[in-house]
Image: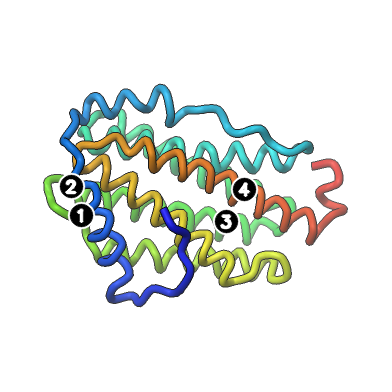
Amino acid sequence: MRKCTGKFSNAHRGDNIMRNRYFQWQQWPLRSVVAASLIICISAYAQPARVPAGKLPGEMRKLWHDHVALTRAYILQAVANQPSARPTLQRLMRNQVDIGNAFKPYYGNTAGNQLTALLKEHIAIAAKIVESGKGKPLPSLTFTDEWFTNADQIAALLHQLNPQYWGLEEMKKMMHHHLKITTAEVLACLHGGSGAGAYVKIHQQAMEMADTLTAGIQRQVPKKTETA
């Protein structure tokens, strides 16, 4: 999936992403959703990539590994209407609390709580997108647009916390790319595929996101991260 290189209009951004990915995925032969769910065991819970030395890099990568792995598990379970989808979504929401808590030692409780709130919204909208796409050619474009608006809000908060090392446009591109490749995974699963290929890219980008955030914290507040 090509990385986002520019701004999308609110009117057409979600439509272009959803429709382009849909026309690619509809060429795939339909597979059993139940069989796709088995992919959880071999890819969604794959171990995080090897991490740089130090406590903070490893913790940040583990948090974002869990973010995308639990998201994948939820997508597969929700598409298959499995009862396990609800507890998985609850675990995923707790992961957003963990991510926000990881920022508190460096940016304070208020900032950490703000990040958690935005990330929970990020997950809640994703769940709506999955539900809206069941049995339909495309998920709700309204929810897709809300998803990108939320991504811009997350980017703006990160930039506000660390304007020198987390540039606003860089953060927007990072978040937009995360949504675009996750959209590919969602559409694949909704139309009978496993989304395994998309997940490889999602996990790789999540580790890059984690490293970007870690580097920004370490450069902005080096004394606080000397033992982290």
Q: Secondary structure at mark 1?
A: helix
Q: Amino acid at mark 2?
A: Gln
Residue 210: which numbered mark, if any?
A: 4
At x 73% / y 70%, what residue is drawn? 164
| Marks 2/4: CA–CA distance | 33 Å
| Marks 1/3: CA–CA distance | 39 Å
Residue 26: which numbered mark, if any?
A: 2
- Nearer to us in this view, 111 or 16: 16
Q: Decide which of tag 2 and tag 4 comes sooner along the chain.
A: 2
* Residue highlighted by disc 3: 113
At x 29% / y 34%, what residue is drawn? 194
Kindly indicate the quadrant of the structure image that contains residue 188: top left
| Marks 2/1: CA–CA distance | 5 Å
Q: Amino acid at mark 1?
A: Phe
At x 70% / y 58%, what residue is drawn? 108
| Image quadrant in which the C terminus is located | top right
* Residue highlighted by disc 1: 23
At x 21% / y 33%, what residue is drawn? 80
